[in-house]
Amino acid sequence: MTNALPNVSVPSNLYSGGAVTFNAMPWINYFTQKQQRDQAKEDAFYRFFGEMNKAVTPTGMAANDIPGLMQRKNQWQQYALENKGAIAHPSLDGGKAYGQYLGLYNDMQNYIGQSTNKFKGLSTLQPILRSPQKNALLNAKTMNDIHAGALPIDHPNYRPFDTTSVEFNPQPFDIKQQNALRSSISGFKPSDDQPLIQNVGNNQQRVTHNYKFSTDQLAGLYNIGASQYDNNPSFRNMIDGIEHGGQYDQLNQAYKEHYGHDIQDEHDLSAAYVMSLHPSTQNKVETRNIPYSPWERASASLWAQNQHYDYRKKQEDKAAQEGINGVDKLMSDMDEDAKQGGPRGVNVNGNQYYGYLVPITPKLGNVFTKKDPTGKHNIIADELYHTTDGQYLPIYYQRDENGYVRDDKGNAIPDPIMSQPISRSALRASYGNELITRKTNEKALNVGGKKSYGAGGLN
């Protein structure tokens, strides 16, 4: 049996299935939509970039900061153009480019804000800076701060200026403050150790004083100067402005004379300046008329002396008639008479006094008559001074059997116990009692019939 395949005919169109047509529209639509979406994203990026670019403006900034802004803006724009794909599609690099892009933009905005605040702050100072008078009131620190704050922000020396830190120079150390300081040191009374007196003709003499402050006084003056420097801005500013040469050299010379060394620091200079205000240092050398008071003229000759006594006796008689008011007037006239001769210095046991020599009439001598230390003799004051502080100082010189006790320089020595100052009111009471209640016929150099030593002046 033959197993042959049957004769089967294959249709000619077995796999044709008829005509087939491929539909490409979905793909075309997808591609078109994707392009549209990508274009929309790119358009949105440029719109966003444009809006941000508009916000970068120098309005309100300081002029010297605008170049810095333009440099930052150019860098920002250049970065945006070079990385626009990654900026528009943050998924491409995980948002790195987009973050850098925003960082550059924020840096520009911060820069603009800084410059705007800087301009506003400095503008508030313009009324002061434009006025030479007001400008001079700003201290050096504030001027340096303003200069640093006005520099471009990118300058290495730029520092933001704090408008609340403005400081002005203290008011000048003026004559009013000088007088107040001069008054505060007037209580320091230096000794005048053997002033040099030279006649220069024309009835004048030059007096070179040799003023010496004690150790305690020097310490007191130094403390006042140091305190002024530490606590008084006006004083400190004045001291800091004293430059070497001229005034500084003069102050240094005076300081060295009293303190024994040159000025070392601001406190030393302050002490020297305070000392320079003391009247004794300002009047170290003076030219004055030769003292020639009415009493000295009376002492020039016996006749003139008698004339003066007669004149004073008449005044005393008149005062006795007028009572205590007459005594007041007599003492005032006596003081004015004495002041014609100028002040003199007298040292009593180390205490320096300054006063005007008062003529001692017999009645005034009665007031200043005391027993000597032996109790045997009545002693009339040798001299009487109306002191510059308003008291009266009788001088009784020590005596030995030969007359006066003198020191090794030939000067008579005042008795420290008997030579004590009294007040004006005490003298007024005693003098008034002598003029008004006692008899007036006692002789000039005799008291109660007892011999008296001393005659109102040294022979």
Image (tube, grey):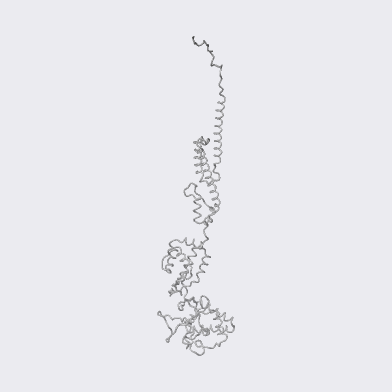
List the single residue furthest toward the bottom.
Answer: 449
- Position of the C terminus by quadrant: bottom left
Look at 55% across and 44% down and name the residue there.
59
Q: Check the image and report above or below for 116 versus 301.
A: above
Q: Residue furthest top?
A: 1
Query: Front-most of 417 and 303?
Result: 417
Instruction: Report which quarter residue 53 is drawn in.
Output: top right
- Depth check: give the residue in front, 144 or 5: 5
Q: Quadrant of residue 37?
A: top right
Occupied quadrant, residue 50: top right
Report the residue at 57% width, 86% height from top: 437
Residue closest to the eye, 73 or 104: 104
Residue 228 in the image: state x and y as whole percent.
50, 64
Residue 393 location (% of width, % of height): 50, 79
Number of numbered discs visible in the structure rendering: 0
Residue 264, relative to residue 11: is it above or below?
Answer: below
Tell which residue pokes out farthest to the left in this image. 408
Which of 334 and 150 lies nearest the eye of the viewer? Answer: 150
Residue 340: horizontal and vertical position, in percent? 51, 76
Residue sitting at the far front? 1
